[in-house]
Image (cartoon, rainbow, N blue to C red):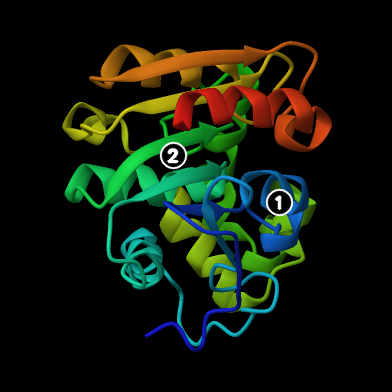
Amino acid sequence: MTENIPLILEGKGTPLILLHGFMMNKESFASQISYFSKYFKVCAYDMCGFGQNSCMTYPYNLDDYVSEFLKVANMFSSKVNVIAHSFGARVVLKCASLNDIIDKMVICGGAGLKPRYSFKKSAKRCVYRLIRPLFKKEQLEKIFFSSDYNMLGDVMKESFKLVTSEHLDGLLNKIECPTMAIYGSDDDQTPIYMGRRLQSRMKNCKLFVMEGCNHFCYLQKPTLFNSVVKEFLL
């Protein structure tokens, strides 16, 4: 049942589900909803903890988000296509490794892969582990965690830790569905090497790099993004 999941449904035809990124919501896909609803039955929804689906009663892990996605996908009587950005890509990559409900998927700035740590980041992690017993958790979070993280409530913080601690590299070779990975050339959150890793480890994955774009290429250049995705999906 999806009565507690806020969603937008527009258009007719093959289902196309849109999954937003962290700290985003379904409305961030406004350009994609208006464009793709001419060709698909578009469904965009707020994942738990975000947008109008803000009430999280316990910390969700990645499997909880996969279960939520399946509730939405099971509204339809056929396989679904997917466009997933960043955090949303974690959900569909894991889902696609477990079952065949996804026909085609587009991964935009996809997160979920183990990052390369620079010397600076590695040193910061070591310092954090060393001084963790000496300070209160709240003090350490203000110093070592991002401003976005520190804006979250306690339950969402725990959910964030659960989700981001799970790396999906080992599941990529289990994904069968045709996939297009789209990454911005200037993305410093999910750099291009992650897109190249998807392309090399998945059985049927194409990589498209959007030049001059950052982590939000679907917002920066929606006309180009929509055109590339349409050609892939249709």
Q: Which mark is residue 29?
A: 1
Query: Is residue 188 among the parts visible in the rendering?
Result: no
Q: Amino acid at mark 2?
A: Gly
Which label sits in the foreground, 1 or 2?
1
Residue 112 got which mark?
Answer: 2
Q: Percent x, y for residue 40?
A: 52, 50
> How many other residues sit within 10 Å of disc 2, few (<14), some (14-19) or many (≥20)?
many
In the rendered image, the vertical position of residue 53 relative to residue 232, given as above or below: below
* Residue at x 68% of width, y 52% of height: 33
On the image, the x and y values in percent for residue 144 come to 69, 47
SS at circle 2: loop
> Residue sitting at 45 percent across and 46 percent down?
82
Q: Residue at x 35, y 20 (%)?
A: 205
Question: Three-letter amino acid code at disc 1?
Answer: Phe
At horizontal 48% and vertical 14% (from top left) the residue drawn is: 207
Q: Earlier in the sequence, mark 1 or mark 2?
A: 1
> Does residue 32 sit above or below 48 in this rendering?
above
Residue 7, compared with residue 123, is above or below; it is below
**Residue 191 relative to residue 112: left or right:** right
Instruction: In the rendered view, tell whether residue 165 sits above or below residue 50.
Output: above
